[in-house]
Image (cartoon, helix red, strand yellow):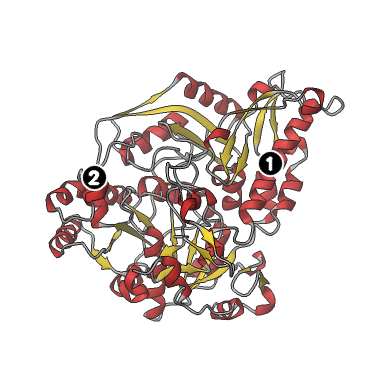
Amino acid sequence: MKSDLDIARQYEMLHIRDMAAKLDICKADIEYYGKYKAKLPLKLIDEEKVKASKLVLVTAITPTPAGEGKTTISIGLSQALNRIGVKSTVVLREPSLGPVFGIKGGATGGGHAQVVPMEDINLHFTGDFAAIEKAHNLLSAIIDNNIQNKKANLGLDTRTIRWSRVMDMNDRSLRSVVIGLGGVNGGIPRECGFKITAASEVMAILCMSSSIKDLKEKLGNIFIGYTNDKKPIFARDLKVHGAMAALLKDAIKPNLVQTTEGTPAIIHGGPFANIAQGTNTIIGTKMGMTFSDIVVTEAGFGADLGAEKFIDIKCRESGLRPNAIVLVATIRALRYHGGVGVKDTGIVNLEALKKGVENLEKHIENIKLFGITPIIAINKFVDDSQEEIDFVKKTCEDLGTKAYTCEVWAKGGEGAIELAKEVEKIVQVKNDIKFIYDKEDSIEDKVTQIAQKLYGAMKVEFSSKASSDIKKINELGFSNLPICIAKTQKSISDDPSLRGNPKGFTFKVRAVELSSGAGFIIPISGEIMLMPGLPTIPSSENIDIDDDGNIIGLF
């Protein structure tokens, strides 16, 4: 069987100016990054055209080691829409090097439903992640410089500083560090740490910004800590937000590439959904909608994380509304949720499937809470039995929704024609999006509503630290911000070992962070880490480059 990389290389890519022409973008308006990548200037966004376009959100059941293929379905669906005569663009997030070299691998789809050039996109791409990393760490450096600056010292209490450093790599050794060692020349010693770049508030800000002016204002609103006399300090007080925005002058522009079938693809921003909002930039989505009849986009991990944040955070802030939601499931993943081991997910097991389908049922129920009935995409594998597929379709039918078998990995857009036809029909139906909570509710109430309505928790328990964090956020005047829960992606609950549809558990919040620049509050539950670690056998062991400069082993 050919690898994803082998399949991607068998397609002849169009020059990026030809991709721009497909969207009716003048070649004079694109900024070239070689033959197959380009950036698009913000001036091209037309709000009236955005309003006329339709938006499709692709989400998934709770992720499993067996895989679900949400990105692959997103790409395949957009390809299928173009095949049936609908002008469609797929808008996705940028991959992080952490998962690429870790356990998950790349994030450019698979088989005959990929975005290309996949090697470039999965590695450095157009340098957006590097720019975000630099902007974040510039603020870190300015903070420590101010602490030891006797003339312009703001009097920051180092014990209250919450701003860390970031790098785009899984390195658990950097989660908690001591900086400033080395005597007078080394600075002032204090505790600090690193997050992965995808968890940076600068990443979140980039994805929530609508313009350079808005970006700069949001960067200035980043909360740093308190002075010794309890005065709050923000990035604007350090006069650094302008320089940070300058570092992001190109990163804020969406990236144009293509799929293996020549469908336009915009890839921009890359926050994780288990520790951030998990969606691509507002700017990227609006750029796609400016030039397309239907834009297909995705939200990270399961619907309890990505879809909830897409609607409660991104839609609330931007005014965007999904006209349809596609929920991706695989028979293998449902078997896993039914209790089988990872090695046995490829074996037909109707009994395990019947138990595991509870996870799908819960996600359907959750999406309906937002005022939309999802369409189900069954991402088909060769070992799926027809009896199992029929059972899932009948379950969906009983719940008032439709399920379609998709074979986009093997067939590209041709493998999602039926789904595309249903999507084309559904997006014409008016729906009224509902939010899970009101922004003016207390922080505790907002968290409780998410945990009880979406996760199925019996109650929510806040640690003493979390309660203290909430008190400080209230005092700062940010209690009315949306909620961005950081929790495991492996379960609807906060316990990664609980598969399927857990019930009656207590959702525990151990800490609450403020992202005043991005415009949301982050309650942290369970053992979720903002700097992931590498697995025992990382994907990097398989990645190499040959003598001709070709990347190998990337997937």
- Relative to 432, 22 lies left or right: right
Residue at image x 47%, y 39%?
483
The amino acid sitting under disc 1 is: Asn
Q: Residues within 10 Å of mark 2 (few under 14, many from 20)?
A: few
Numbered mark located on residue 379 in the image: none
Q: Specify whether residue 14 is in view.
A: yes
Numbered mark located on residue 137 in the image: 1
Q: Report x, y in % for residue 491.
A: 32, 41
Q: Specify whether residue 442 is in view.
A: no
Closer to the camera, 424 or 61?
61
Going from the N terminus, do you reach mark 1 or mark 2 first? 1
According to the picture, the residue beneath numbered tag 2 turns out to be 341
Q: Is residue 123 above or below residue 167?
A: below
Q: Secondary structure at mark 2?
A: loop
Q: Report x, y in % for residue 244.
A: 72, 47
Q: Residues within 10 Å of mark 1 (few under 14, many from 20)?
A: many
Q: Is residue 205 above or below residue 475?
A: below
The amino acid sitting under disc 2 is: Gly
